[in-house]
């Protein structure tokens, strides 16, 4: 079973995401800030990361940058989540090494499809 | 054939010579016959015979000698005097006069006196004008330069809606429009019923009226004012409102439209969710439950889509804010360098790559870049701080990237996040870098260059749909105004009765592959210049090389200097002619030996018709000085002492200008003879044409 790490500081979203991902047949781990996300990845590498940009403390961009800086995580699929949805943010995310980008609010089915596609690609 | 002798004109030299030789011949022949007859009748001898022969030849001999004397002492000096007077009127300042000869020698001092007196008067007038009007001129110049530097496009029209003045900004706005020119009608530039109507109803007290007029695919906000205490002149100021209209209006309308949809979907979602929570356990998994769930799904999707579109509108609104203006990147780097040269520790940004246009709030951008550079220098290792930074503009699809490049590694995100908190104290309300990034719809990130040695800090900015460097600055005082246009007769009056001085004239000339235009020779170069109000406009020219579609014979190259290589890549005649037709507009054409040039620009099957009146300086000169020989451009230029720039002779534009100068020299002489309207001039040259035909 593929393991997905959901990093978001909004409990409501995390709750739904966790449920949806489990429904879709994934094992879900959560983190509510950048530090714990990095820790979680270091403890046990997930198969995919759903990473919100606005996090307390270090930002999603920084988490992304730090992960990509280590060769062990160079190939880890990472989908960025944002409530801003400006195109230039999407571009920045992709420039820093994100695999995909999803704007809130999102269609749950589209999210599940994207996760599945990336896992298939990586797998 | 009847050589029509015009009263008051010196007979042609050939006619006089012919008459003289004829009379001398008849007299000599008659004398000889008479002498023979007398000789055979009286058989005189010795002295008597000599006397008889001499007496009989004396008549013819006298006529011959008197004729010779008159030609030497009177007729030749008279012709020279005619040239002198013509030159004096055409070009009072021409030098190299030669004194009257023969029996007219006595007129010399008088002529010198007249000439010197006239020159002195002219000088005195010029000096008086210069001194008396110096301050007025200075004030006018200052006002003119003020108008020229105004960013707002300005047009000033006379009561007949002809352009009297336009400034540089107007030139930029109407760039490439053939109808922006002094004396041209406003309607040919902006043709709308609303403008015509507003002009007709404009109050005379100078109160402004505002209206929005379409121009191409743009909208111009036009403010009209009748200039108080004038002859009904109108000042128009124009603002291109397209951007703010489509931007603000478009986005506001779009936002307003989206809002009800957002409310609707949000209400649908809320009520469905509410209903769902109230369902009891028994109702779970019923049809109602499924329907409510579907509603929630549908409304969520719709809400997501609407929000995305809403967000785009907000983004665009932010980027189209009024303070984001077009900036040429080289200007930005230059100003930035001037700013950072003042602050210590920061060197200089060397622009690399191709410059480009971008959109930004210049002040904010400069303050932000200055602070970013300070942070950057601080962040670089000690041994790299002194190395010069480079600035590069990279082009993306919708954005341009303003990159600061240094030798080293990229900056970490956390540093950049910290920098975004920095407040820009030099700006009002001291916004943070993050705020200013938002203002530009931008972000900040750092990346490594492909060469593995350099890194860059990337600042995406809105791009501008504009290509190429800004146009070079115009010469200091171009001819943007002519208030004399207001004195021209109304444009609907007959062109024929228009004074020659008031004509708009385009003087043109062609260079060709040869003289056989009716066979296969054709144009290699076409040049023209414009005369408005008897003034040759220095900048208003047409100068175009033409690909003749055949080799240029060396004999022709020897004349105009154009080789096959010179015309390679030039447009063909059928492309040039419509442009030239637009350049001519409503003007009257002028050329020297116009028949040839007209034939050259109207080859068989040409689409452009040049049906306007045509003035010909060759014919006019012949009509004015029928007693003089030599009416080709070179002879006339030297006769009237008309100067032209070295090397410009025998170029199309050079000869067109020389022809224009020749016309201006002939003008006072035409007027002195009562030839003041276009009709008169055309009639005069038609007469010269007839005569030439008759004697040919």
Image (spheres, helix red, strand yellow):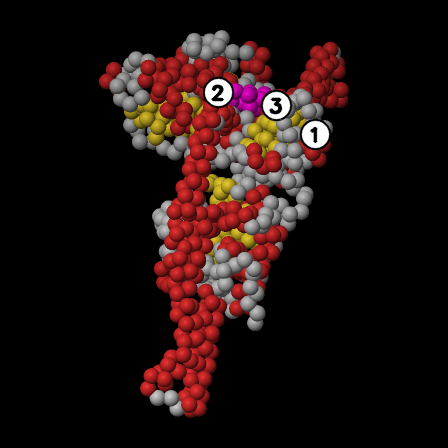
Q: What residue is rendered at 67% in x and 22% in y?
A: B205
C-alpha gap between disc 1 and disc 2: 36 Å
Q: Is residue B120 magenta?
A: no
**Mark 3 surroundings: few (<14), some (14-19) or many (≥20) residues within 10 A:** some
Identity of the residue drawn at 55% across and 14% down: A14
Residue B77, percent across and down? 41, 58
Q: Chain of mark 2?
A: B
Q: How many marks?
A: 3
Front of the two marks 1 and 2: 1
Q: Which mark is residue B198?
A: 1
Give the vertical position of B647 relative to B140 (above or below).
below
Dot 1 or dot 2, earlier in sequence: 1
Label 1 close to label 3 by CB (< 8 Å)? no
List the residue tagged with mark 3. B248
Question: For the residues marked 2 and 3, what is the alpha-carbon distance in whole angstroms?
Answer: 17 Å
Q: Which numbered marker is on residue B361?
A: 2
Residue B5's place in the image compared with B541, above or below, is below
User: Residue B675, image x and y in percent?
Assistant: 58, 50
Q: Which secondary structure type mostly characterizes the magenta part of the structure?
A: helix
Numbered badge on residue B441: none
Depth check, front residue: B595 or B91: B91
The range drawn in magenta is B311-325
* Residue B236 vertical placement versus B115 (above, below): above
């Amino acid at each position: 079973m593929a393991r997905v790490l959901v990093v978001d500081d909004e409990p409501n979203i995390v709750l739904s995401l966790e449920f949806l991902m489990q429904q879709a047949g994934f094992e879900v781990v959560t983190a509510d800030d950048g530090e714990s996300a990095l820790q979680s990845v270091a403890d046990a590498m997930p198969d995919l990361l759903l990473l919100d940009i606005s996090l307390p403390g270090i930002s999603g961009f920084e988490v992304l940058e730090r992960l990509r800086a280590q060769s062990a995580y160079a190939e880890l699929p990472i989908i960025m989540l944002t409530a801003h949805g400006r195109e230039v943010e999407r571009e920045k995310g992709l420039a820093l090494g994100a695999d995909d980008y999803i704007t809130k609010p999102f269609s749950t089915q589209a999210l599940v499809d994207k996760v599945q596609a990336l896992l298939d690609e990586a797998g | 054939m009847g050589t029509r002798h015009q009263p008051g004109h010196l007979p042609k030299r050939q006619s006089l010579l012919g008459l003289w030789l004829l009379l001398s011949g008849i007299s000599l022949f008659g004398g000889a016959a008479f002498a023979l007859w007398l000789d055979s009748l009286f058989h005189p001898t010795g002295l008597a015979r000599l006397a008889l022969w001499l007496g009989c030849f004396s008549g013819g001999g006298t006529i011959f000698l008197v004729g010779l004397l008159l030609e030497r002492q009177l007729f030749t000096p008279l012709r020279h005097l005619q040239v002198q007077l013509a030159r004096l009127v055409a070009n009072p300042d021409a030098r190299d006069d030669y004194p009257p000869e023969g029996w007219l020698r006595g007129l010399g001092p008088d002529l010198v006196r007249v000439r010197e007196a006239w020159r002195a008067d002219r000088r005195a007038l010029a000096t008086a004008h210069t001194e008396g009007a110096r301050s007025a001129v200075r004030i006018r110049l200052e006002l003119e330069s003020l108008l020229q530097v105004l960013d707002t496009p300005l047009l000033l029209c006379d009561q007949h809606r002809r352009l009297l003045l336009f400034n540089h900004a107007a030139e930029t706005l109407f760039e490439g429009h053939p109808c922006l020119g002094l004396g041209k009608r406003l309607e040919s530039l902006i043709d709308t019923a609303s403008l015509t109507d507003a002009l007709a109803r404009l109050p005379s007290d100078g109160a402004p009226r505002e209206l929005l007029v379409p121009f191409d695919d743009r909208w111009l906000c036009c403010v009209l004012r009748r200039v108080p205490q004038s002859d009904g002149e109108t000042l128009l100021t124009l603002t291109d409102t397209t951007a703010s209209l489509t931007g603000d209006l478009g986005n506001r309308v779009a936002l307003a439209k989206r809002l009800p949809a957002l409310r609707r979907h949000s209400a649908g979602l809320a009520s469905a969710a509410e209903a769902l929570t109230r369902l009891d356990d028994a109702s779970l998994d019923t049809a109602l439950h499924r329907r409510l769930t579907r509603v929630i799904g549908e409304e969520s999707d719709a809400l997501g889509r609407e929000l995305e579109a809403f967000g785009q509108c907000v983004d665009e609104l932010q980027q189209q804010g009024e303070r984001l203006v077009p900036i040429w990147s080289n200007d930005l780097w230059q100003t930035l360098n001037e700013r950072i040269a003042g602050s210590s520790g920061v060197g200089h940004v060397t622009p690399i790559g191709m410059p480009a246009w971008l959109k930004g709030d210049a002040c904010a951008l400069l303050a932000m870049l200055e602070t970013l550079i300070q942070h950057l220098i601080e962040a670089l290792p000690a041994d790299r701080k002194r190395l010069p930074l480079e600035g590069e503009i990279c082009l993306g699809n919708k954005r341009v990237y303003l990159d600061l490049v240094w030798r080293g590694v990229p900056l970490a995100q956390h540093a950049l996040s910290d920098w975004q908190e920095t407040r820009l104290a030099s700006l009002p309300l001291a916004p943070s870098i993050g705020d200013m990034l938002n203002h530009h719809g931008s972000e900040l990130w750092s990346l490594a260059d492909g060469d593995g040695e350099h890194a860059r800090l990337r600042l995406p900015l809105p791009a501008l749909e504009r290509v190429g460097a800004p146009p070079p600055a115009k010469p200091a005082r171009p001819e943007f105004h002519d208030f004399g246009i207001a004195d021209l007769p109304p444009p609907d009056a007959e062109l024929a009765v228009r004074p020659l001085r008031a004509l708009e004239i385009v003087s043109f000339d062609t260079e060709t592959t040869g003289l056989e235009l009716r066979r296969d020779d054709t144009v290699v170069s076409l040049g023209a210049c414009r005369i408005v109000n008897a003034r040759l406009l220095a900048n208003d020219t047409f100068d175009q090389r033409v690909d003749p579609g055949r080799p240029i014979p060396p004999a022709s190259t020897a004349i105009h200097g154009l080789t096959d290589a010179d015309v390679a890549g030039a447009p063909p005649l059928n492309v040039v002619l419509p442009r030239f037709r637009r350049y001519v507009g409503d003007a009257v054409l002028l050329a020297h030996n116009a028949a040839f040039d007209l034939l050259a620009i109207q080859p068989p099957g040409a689409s452009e018709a040049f049906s306007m009146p045509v003035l010909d300086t060759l014919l006019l000169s012949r009509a004015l000085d029928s007693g003089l020989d030599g009416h080709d451009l070179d002879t006339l230029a030297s006769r009237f002492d008309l100067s032209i720039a070295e090397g410009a002779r025998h170029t199309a534009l050079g000869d067109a200008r020389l022809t224009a100068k020749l016309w201006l020299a002939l003008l006072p002489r035409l007027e002195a003879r009562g030839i003041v309207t276009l009709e008169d001039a055309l009639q005069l040259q038609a007469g010269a044409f007839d005569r030439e035909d008759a004697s040919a």
